[in-house]
Image (cartoon, rainbow, N blue to C red):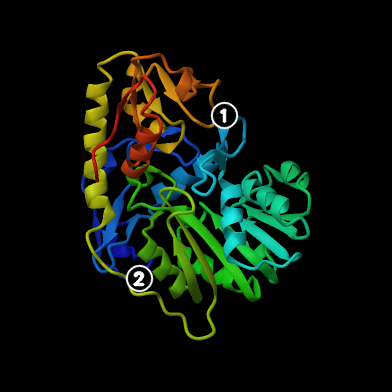
Amino acid sequence: MTTESCVCVVCGSSHLVERPGFAALARVTSDCRPFPAGGRLAACADCAMVQKLPTPLWHEETARIYREYAIYHQSGGREQAVLDAVTGRPRRRSQVIVDRLAAGVALPAAGRMIDIGCGNGAMISAFAERLPGWSLSGFEIDSTHDEVLRAIPGFARLYTGSLDAVPPGFDVITMLHALEHFAEPVAVLRDLHGKLAPGGLLLIQVPNAALNPFDLMIADHLSHFTPDSLAHLVGRAGFRVESVATDWVAKEISLQARPAAGPATGVPVRAGRPVSDDGIAWLETLVNDAGKAAQDQPFGLFGTSIAATWLFGALADRVAFFVDEDPGRAGGTYFDRPVLAPEAVPAGACVFLALAPTVADAIGRRLGHLPIRFFRPSAL
């Protein structure tokens, strides 16, 4: 398949420009495992949307990734903690999202909710804690986590296989880090349009590729969104976008929408320089900078998720430890290296903040009092 036989997943244009050199870069899976180099990345010449090309090889690779998927394996299946900007404390990501949703939308005491791409139920569990009167369901490609899901209070049913299996009538549909995996995201959203009850709410969260270039290297992510491109896509699928936030969770986009009454129209896209152009160059520089920093020992990587996993693939023999603020991960091991809480890092050790620049800067300021030599990535 060539770029000429593909169309942009957002605007439908056939003017896709492939990013040369991408296939030579090592990748990572969305469940945080190193993955071999390969794949094809392109940007739309009309709307600047960055996307993988859904070639037969891409479908083959993603099928293999999902067959071996190990969700949150770094913490025994427990969802990772993120810094809650409201409380200033680490909390489970889904708890933060449900709290922000409930703070901005008047949700009734009872209703029907389904989480698309529910995994082992992190979002469903957080929803159950906040709104115990709701009937909760999930959708996944298979029934791997059915037993775990059934133990969640209020859980009704797991739908599997095709979205055709999901019935209509849901008051809330959530998609957390799911939309970017689908080869035809507009078609998926149009399908979900008919699953909502009248006036129902759609909540989507995806990585913000404009702030997080590491997203480009995730092998099973097809779409790499910015706030504008996500809003445009959702509008084209027949929804009225109510809000687009980038401050619920760092480097992620949280969008709320409801079915539109009239014809489908996308929010205008402010086309500009594709995020892949600067993002790939920044990642190449990052690897070089980290390699230089790793000459000082002991050397560690901050984090145990996508960014640190991807960088570990390039620096494995020089990484002595990982650092993580998540109490569910600190104290364990990752790739046979110890995972240390920041306070447990030996004085004078070198720690590379393998994170998006805005996040790295915030962490560097917050932990600057520790006797650690932090190395931050360059600005995008």
Above or below — where is 194 with respect to 245?
below
**Which mark's residue is nearer the viewer, 1 or 2?**
1
Q: CA distance from mark 1 to mark 2?
A: 42 Å
Where's residue 7, x and y in %? 34, 66
Do the residues under discs 1 and 2 have CB atoms within 8 angstroms? no
Above or below — where is 129 with respect to 316?
below
Amino acid type assigned to the residue bearing label 1 in the image: Pro
Q: Is residue 71 visible?
A: yes
Where's residue 188, x and y in %? 52, 65
Comparing 53 with 154, the one in front is: 154
Where's residue 122, x and y in %? 63, 46
Above or below — where is 374 with respect to 54?
above
Tell me the residue at 40%/49% (across/down). 251
Comparing 274 with 161, the one in front is: 274
- Secondary structure beneath dot 2 equals loop
The total of numbered circles placed on residues is 2
Sequence-wise, the earlier of marks 1 and 2 is 2
Comparing 47 with 246, the one in front is: 246
Tell me the residue at 36%/65% (across/down). 228
Where's residue 2, x and y in %? 29, 57
Q: Is residue 13 left or right of residue 162?
A: left
Q: Is residue 275 left or right of residue 327?
A: left
Tell me the residue at 78%/44% (across/down). 151
Q: Is residue 335 visible?
A: no
Q: Which residue is mark 2?
A: 11
Residue furthest bottom as drawn: 262
Q: Which residue is mark 1?
A: 327
